[in-house]
Image (spheres, rainbow, N blue to C red):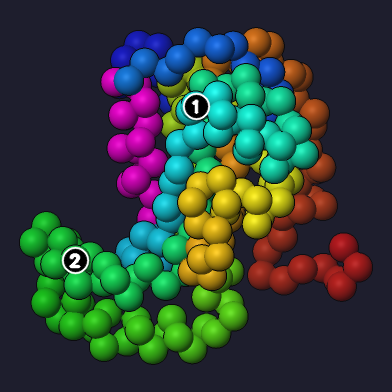
Amino acid sequence: MSKSDLTAAEAIRTRRSIKSFKSDPIPEPVLQELLSLMQDAPSSWNFQPTRVVMIRSKEQKEALSAAAWHQKQILDAPVTFVFAASIRGWEKHMDLILEDGSKSGAWPQKFTDFIRENAPGFQRALGEREREYAIKDAMIMATTLAIAAQAKGYGNCYINGWDELKVKQIIGAEGDKNIAIALVLPVGVPITYPKHPGRLHSSKTIFTDRLPSPLI
């Protein structure tokens, strides 16, 4: 870790939703490190359903901004990440994932056999919720990138307002029912940092064992 890196706690406490970015590019070594850190995010069964598209060209930025109701941070940031989820991608990559887990020594043969025998049935039994599960994993990866970027001095903004059909068209997934869009995340050098808007007191949001009532 370089001297300029923030700790995880510092990155979490200082991160804000950045609406204006400088046009400064992210140096390639830093970008590659962020990508590597992002890829270490966990996922259910380690099936790694997230597919990340980096939007960098002027034309693609303009198209994505238009699909996201003209949010200008997409135009300003040097890179905007589109986090897509491959709902059934595990069917194509499961053998490779199990092989990697075994070769690394992380998974004994008994465990890889368990996943091979049980994971497909679990996934298919989810039905329509399989999309939801894949999106959850994509959100975990997006959050990992957001904190890693903040630690390196690069701000970001979670964007959850966009037309999914248009975003899928922009990234080349038009008509692909296997692909779901989870999040759009511009990353770059902030022009200014907004103040912390505050959070509800923990007594209103954190509980032990049970929620206090249906009307919380």
Q: Quadrant of the N terminus?
A: top left
Q: Is residue 26 left or right of residue 16?
A: left
- Is residue 155 located in the magenta-colored stretch of the structure? no
Residue on which the image places disc 1 = 57
Query: Which of these two is toward me, 28 or 6?
Result: 28
**Residue at 79 percent of width and 32 percent of height:** 198
Asked if residue 193 can be seen in this view, the reply is yes
Compared to residue 119, the image places residue 173 above or below, namely: above
Q: Quadrant of the C terminus?
A: bottom right
Front disc: 1 or 2:
1
Please identify the residue farthest to the right as the structure is shown.
Answer: 215
Image location (x, y in percent) of residue 130:
52, 75
| Residue 106 lies in quadrant | bottom left
Q: Is residue 52 left or right of residue 159?
A: left
Asked if residue 11 can be seen in this view, the reply is no
Choose the circle earlier in sequence order: 1 or 2: 1
**Residue at 73 percent of width and 31 percent of height:** 71
Question: Within 10 Å of the Cα at label 2, are there few (<14), some (14-19), or many (20+) other Cα atoms?
Answer: few
**Residue at 80 percent of width and 28 percent of height:** 197
Mainly helix, strand or loop, the magenta region? helix
Image location (x, y in percent) of residue 78:
51, 21
Tell me the CA gap for discs 1 and 2: 32 Å
Image location (x, y in percent) of residue 124:
45, 86
User: Which residues are drawn in magenta?
Assistant: 29-42
Residue on which the image places disc 2 = 96
Disc 1 is placed on an element classified as: loop
Compared to residue 116, the image places residue 47 above or below, namely: above
Give, as a three-letter code, the residue at label 2.
Leu
Give, as a three-letter code, the residue at label 1.
Ser
Image location (x, y in percent) of residue 176:
51, 66
Question: Within 10 Å of the Cα at label 1, are there few (<14), some (14-19), or many (20+) other Cα atoms?
Answer: few
Q: Are marks 1 and 2 in contact (CB under 8 Å)?
A: no
